[in-house]
Image (spheres, rainbow, N blue to C red):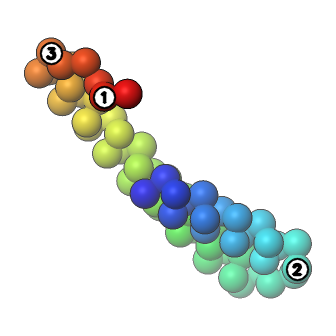
Amino acid sequence: MLHWAITFLLIALAAAILGFGGIAALSVEAARILFGVFIILFLITAVMHVLRGKAPPL
């Protein structure tokens, strides 16, 4: 999921440099949504590991 957020961010940066405003705005919004979902899922799994008493995998 983080990979997709970074991919959309890079697409947005490339589109912004080349002057494609609509594509850049859409890619930034997709990156923000995916990053938010990634952070929420990360926090949920971290809390579940703490509640179970297991060490997180490396």
In this figure, which residue is indicated by the disc labeled 1? 57
Q: Percent position (x, y) of residue 52?
A: 11, 21
Q: What is the spatial separation of the Cα atoms under label 3 and label 2, in whole angstroms?
A: 50 Å
Amino acid of disc 2: Leu
Instruction: Judge left or right: residue 58 versus residue 50.
Output: right
Where, by quadrant of the figure, is residue 53 drawn? top left
The residue located at (30%, 28%) in the rendering is 57
Farthest top residue? Answer: 53
Report which quarter residue 45 is drawn in: top left
Task: Check the picture and name the quadrant holding the N terminus.
Answer: bottom left
| Residue density around tag 3, few if under 14, some if 14–19, many if 20 or more, within 10 Å | few
Q: Going 87% across and 81% down the picture, which residue do you hit?
A: 19
Q: Which residue is the extreme one toward the front? A: 58
Residue highlighted by disc 3: 53
Dot 2 or dot 1: first in sequence order is 2
Pinpoint residue 39: horizontal percent, then vertical percent: 42, 43
Which residue ends up furthest to the right in the rendered image? 18
Secondary structure, mark 3, is: loop
**Quadrant (top left/top right/bottom left/bottom right) for the C terminus:** top left
Question: Residue at (88%, 79%) from the top-left corner?
Answer: 18
Q: Is residue 39 left or right of residue 50?
A: right
On screen, residue 53 versus residue 21, left or right, reads left
- Which numbered mark, 2 or 1, is in the foreground of this view? 1
Disc 2 element: helix
Residue 6 placement (x, y as % from top left)? 60, 58
The answer to whether residue 21 is above or below residue 4 is below
C-alpha gap between disc 2 and disc 1: 41 Å
**Amino acid at pointer 3:** Gly
Where is mark 2, residue-wise? 18
The residue type indicated by label 1 comes to Pro
